[in-house]
Image (cartoon, helix red, strand yellow):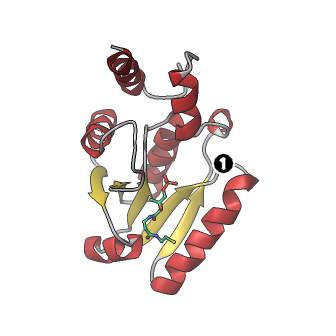
Amino acid sequence: MSTLAVYPGSFDPLTNGHVDIITRGATLFDRIIVSVLVNAEKTPLFTIDERVEILQAVFKDQPNVEVDTFDGLLVDYMERRRADVIVRGLRAVSDFELEFQMALMNRRLNSKIQTVFMMPAEQYTYISSRLIKEVFTLGGRVHGLVPAMVETRLRQKVSAKRS
Ligand code: PNS
């Protein structure tokens, strides 16, 4: 029996913390689908297509990593994809409360689906997409915290906004 995991999220933008969790998940599960939530935020920095394109480029050499999108309830998407496990990253105690609520709500909605929490490498425990956007937009360095492609795309976004 093979285990199919889903790593859902906004990925606006993808950070090295996400990359770390996906890479760990790909060693633990037979296949992992990284699925981008459509319509989460009204004003995202990157469009869904851009986020998918970045994920596909970053994981192009990992055959058991698939990139997809979803909307609606995560458990319904899990059912459609016949997936067994939801993967979520836990960076710090502050993540725990919301993650705990989501995991138990998802279990209530579908008791067959398990949520597995994974911890990223220590150097990524303080990174979030929100902080990356804020720091970069205000002129700070995010080198080493996001994949190179994300850094390039951030630069393009910010210069396009300024012109
Ligand atoms: O990267 P994020 O923003 O922390 O991801 C949050 C996500 C996408 C996992 C969560 O918002 C989600 O699952 N949304 C789908 C709607 C849903 O199923 N809501 C009930 C979950 S308890």
Question: Residue placed farthest to the right in the image?
Answer: 93
Residue at the (32%, 19%) spot, across then down? 160
Q: Residue 59: horizontal and vertical position, in percent?
A: 32, 39
- Where residue 21 sits: x, y (%)? 51, 47
Within 10 Å of disc 1 (Cα), the crowding (few <14, some 14-19, many 20+) is: many
Depth check: 79 or 162 in front? Answer: 162
- 31 vs 10, nearest the viewer: 10
Q: Is residue 111 visible?
A: no
**Residue drawn at (62%, 36%) of the image:** 124
Label 1 sits on residue? 91
32 w.r.t. 2: above or below = above
Examine the rendering and report whether any part of residue 75 can be seen: yes
Q: Relative to residue 33, is residue 23 depicted above or below?
A: above
Q: Quadrant of residue 139?
A: top right
Position in image of residue 20 (x %, y %): 51, 41
* The C terminus, quarter of image: top left
